[in-house]
């Protein structure tokens, strides 16, 4: 878990060096979906500064997992991988993204 915490800290305090590589941030044209902002949102959830709700976890789903941001990261952080971990953690808190509610389960 220390590696996750380090990744969240590095991204949270980064000056958004990878934002121009993120396809979601480029298409959405919103600061809230840059890799830095998504990782900061995940960090707030993990330390209890934000509740685990569909609204607060939406940033975790604003990632395709393509790895473009990781290729630009000077610290070797892989935000896509970490945000996927965040999605799993949201599931552990019984929180789904609003768009996923009502989808057919594979079970």
Image (cartoon, helix red, strand yellow):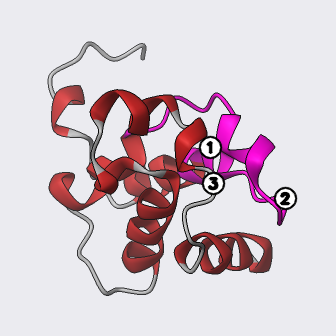
Regarding mark 2 in the picture, which secondary structure is present there?
loop
Does residue 65 belong to the magenta stretch?
yes
Q: Residue at x 29, y 33 (%)?
A: 28
Q: Are marks 1 and 2 in contact (CB under 8 Å)?
A: no
Mark 2, residue position: 76
The one nearer the camera, 36 or 63, is 36
Q: Is residue 60 above or below residue 106?
A: below
- Left or right? Give the position of 34 relative to 102: right
Q: Are marks 1 and 3 in contact (CB under 8 Å)?
A: yes
Q: Position of residue 45 (x, y in %)?
A: 37, 74
- Spatial distance from mark 1 to mark 2, Cα to Cα? 12 Å
Does residue 19 belong to the magenta stretch?
no
Regarding mark 3 in the picture, which secondary structure is present there?
helix
For label 2, count other residues whose C-alpha is less than 10 Å away and answer few (under 14), some (14-19) or many (20+).
few
Q: Residue at x 76, y 55 (%)?
A: 73
Mark 2 / mark 3, whichever is N-terminal: 2
For label 1, count other residues whose C-alpha is less than 10 Å away and answer few (under 14), some (14-19) or many (20+).
many
Q: Where does the C terminus fall, quadrant-wise?
A: top left
Which numbered mark, 1 or 2, is in the foreground of this view? 2
Q: Is residue 8 above or below residue 68?
A: below
Regarding mark 1 in the picture, which secondary structure is present there?
helix
- Spatial distance from mark 2 to mark 3, Cα to Cα? 12 Å
The one nearer the camera, 54 or 34, is 34
Q: Is residue 2 above or below residue 99?
A: below
Mark 1, residue position: 80
Q: Which residues are the magenta region? A: 62-84
Which numbered mark, 2 or 3, is in the foreground of this view? 2
Q: Residue at x 63, y 58 (%)?
A: 17
Mark 3, residue position: 82
- Left or right? Give the position of 26 relative to 7: left
For label 3, count other residues whose C-alpha is less than 10 Å away and answer few (under 14), some (14-19) or many (20+).
many
């Amino acid at each position: 878990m220390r590696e996750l915490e380090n990744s969240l800290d590095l991204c949270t305090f980064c000056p958004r060096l990878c934002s121009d590589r993120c396809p979601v941030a480029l298409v959405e044209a919103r600061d809230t979906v840059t890799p830095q902002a998504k990782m900061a949102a995940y960090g707030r959830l993990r330390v209890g500064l934000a509740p685990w709700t569909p609204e607060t976890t939406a940033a975790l789903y604003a990632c395709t997992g393509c790895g473009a941001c990781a290729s630009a990261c000077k610290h070797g952080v892989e935000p896509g991988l970490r945000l996927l971990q965040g999605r799993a953690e949201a599931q552990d808190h019984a929180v789904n993204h609003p768009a996923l509610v009502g989808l057919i389960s594979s079970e």
